[in-house]
Image: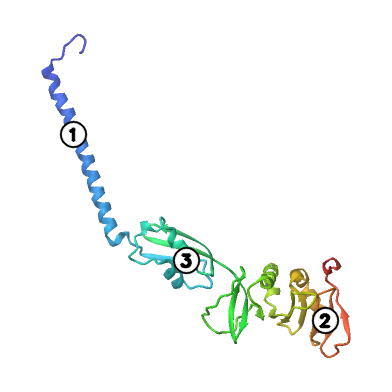
Amino acid sequence: MEKGKIVSIEDRIPKLKKLRKRKANRRLILLLSFFFILIACVLYFLSPLSHIKEIKVMGNQYLSTNQIITLSGLTNDTNIWKVNKSEMIKKMIEAQKEIESVTISTQFPNSVLITVTEFERIAYLSKNNRFYPIMENGKILTELESGEIPVFAPVLIDFTEGDALNQLLDELKVLPEEIRNSISEIRKEPTKTDAYHITMFMNDGFEVSATSRTLSKKMIHYPSIVAQLDPNVKGVINLEVGSFFKAYDTPNLTEEIDGVDQDENH
C-alpha cells in the first residue's frame, strides 16, 4: 500500500510468480551443482587421479628407501585418502627392528611422505667372521646387507644380548662421537671382581683396560691421557682404579697418568 493506494491481488500475482520462479531456479542450480560435484568426486575416487603418484621417504640412513616403501605396503594403486586413516601402515614399518618411530603424511595433490626415525647403530658384533649391527636399544640384527668390516664403529667380541651389553651401550651412547669412533675393538673379559670388565683396542694402537660401569666418565679424558704418552711406545692404559700406563716392552714398569679426577676412581 502506497499512501493510501490499494494494490490489487491481480497486480501482486505476477510479482509472486517471479519470486517463486527465482527461488525454484536457485534450488535447481544448487541441486545440479551438488549433483555434478558428487559425480566429480565419484569419478575422482574411481580414477587414477586419486591414487598415490609419488612416495617420498625421509630420515632413513640404514634402510633403503625401497625397503621402507615395501614395508609400508603402499603402491601407485593405493588411494591417497586411505593413507592417513590407516594405522596399519605405521605398524608394518615399525615392526622392523631398525625403526624407532614413523610418521606418515599426505601432500597435495597425490604424494605421500614417510618420515622415519631409526635406532642408531652403536657398534658391531663380530661372530663367525661376520659383523652384526648392534642398535642403541641393545638389539643385535641377525640379517646383514653385506659382510664388509664396519667403519667408524667399535667391533664387539664375545658379547650377547643382556645386561653387560646394555650397560656398555649406555656408556658408549654418551661418549663424544670422536672418542667412540677411535675405539676399534671391545672385548668382554669379566673377572671375579668385575663382571663388566672390558678390554678395548684403540685405532691409535693403545690398549685400554676398563669397566663399562664407569667407561664414559673415564674415556672422556682419553685425548688428554694419550697426549701425555709417547706415541711410539704402545701399551695398556688401565682405567679401572686410578689411571696408569704399562708399556708392552716394559710390563713391570708402570707410569701414573694425570687427567682422570680422583672422585671418578671410586
Q: Residue furthest left?
A: 10
Residue 24: mark: 1
Q: Residue furthest front?
A: 192
Residue 252: x percent and y percent? 88, 87
Which residue sits at x=85%, y=76%? 257
Q: To which residue does mark 3 refer? A: 93
Frontmost residue, 232 versus 186: 186
Q: CA distance from mark 3 to mark 2?
A: 49 Å
Q: Quadrant of the N terminus?
A: top left
Q: Secondary structure at mark 1?
A: helix
**Three-letter amino acid code at the position of disc 1:** Ala
Q: Are marks 2 and 1 in contact (CB under 8 Å)?
A: no
In the picture, measured across the screen, residue 78 lies left or right of residue 17, that is right
In the picture, measured across the screen, residue 114 lies left or right of residue 148, that is left
Residue 190: x percent and y percent? 75, 78
Q: Is residue 109 visible?
A: no
Q: Quadrant of the C terminus?
A: bottom right
Residue 124: x percent and y percent? 62, 78
Q: Secondary structure at mark 2?
A: loop
Residue 189: x percent and y percent? 73, 80
Q: Secondary structure at mark 3?
A: helix
Frontmost residue, 40 versus 131: 131
Bin the neighbour count of mark 1 within 10 Å (Cα to Cα): few under 14, some 14-19, many 20 and up. few
**Three-letter amino acid code at the position of disc 3:** Ile
Q: Is residue 108 above or below residue 129?
A: above
**Where on the picture, by quarter, is residue 204?**
bottom right
Q: To which residue does mark 2 refer? A: 229
**Three-letter amino acid code at the position of disc 2:** Leu
Which residue sits at x=59%, y=69%? 120
Which residue sits at x=34%, y=60%? 79
Which residue sits at x=84%, y=84%? 246
Q: Is residue 149 visible?
A: yes
